[in-house]
Image (tube, rainbow, N blue to C red):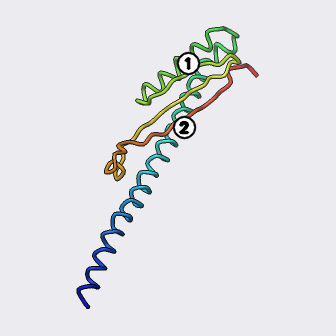
Amino acid sequence: MHRSRGASLSVLFAVLIPALLLCVGLGVDGAAKVAAARRAEGMAASAARSGVDAASAERIASRQEASQIAVRAAEENLRAAGIEGSARVSGNDVLLVDTRISTPTVFMSLIGIVEVSGKGHAEVSLRKR
């Protein structure tokens, strides 16, 4: 009788331990994905702010170069931070910055998912008010 109880406990642990590890892995790597997205969003906003700041004098003078200056400054901000991303100006004088940050997984790499990524986006108007 004692042997069957031990066998059933072994089967129970054999099933529960991997399930528990999977849940912990989803929590840890899910949190890493959220952190990457938050950082990507913050870096996009920072790059957009630097682009608007760099182009502010040109905007006041109503020069056409303001949009190119804003894009260059935003891209330089991303490059200096080592962040993958791009900046462009839309037709209605809005600076658009998109970023992507990847981070390696801890537990999910055991099932073939080696990284998670987060994306960020920021928009800033280049028009004079």
Crowd tier of the residue under label 2, counting other residues whose Cα lies within 10 Å: few below 14, some 14–19, many 20 or above: many
Task: Name the residue tied to disc 1.
Answer: 71
Q: Which quarter shows the N terminus?
A: bottom left
Residue at 33% across / 67% down in the picture? 17
The three-letter amino acid code for the residue at tag 2 is: Glu
Mark earlier in primary sequence (2, 1): 2
Where is 43 relative to 15, above or below? above
Residue at 55% across / 18% down in the picture? 71
Q: Nearer the viewer, residue 121 or 12?
A: 12
Residue 122 falls in image quadrant: top right
Q: Nearer the viewer, residue 56 or 43?
A: 43
Residue 47 percent location from the top left of the image: 54, 28
Residue 86 percent location from the top left of the image: 51, 23
What SS does tag 2 mark?
helix
Where is 105 relative to 61, above or below? below
Task: Residue at the far right: name it.
Answer: 129
Q: Which quarter shows the C terminus?
A: top right
Residue 109 percent location from the top left of the image: 33, 48
The three-letter amino acid code for the residue at tag 1 is: Val
Residue 23 percent location from the top left of the image: 42, 61
Task: Residue at the far bottom: name it.
Answer: 1
What count of labels does the image hold?
Answer: 2
Crowd tier of the residue under label 1, counting other residues whose Cα lies within 10 Å: few below 14, some 14–19, many 20 or above: many
Indicate left or right for 17 with 36 as reference.
Answer: left
What SS does tag 1 mark?
helix
Residue at 30% across / 79% down in the picture? 9
Residue 125 falls in image quadrant: top right
Task: Name the residue tied to disc 2.
Answer: 41
Where is 60 relative to 9, above or below? above
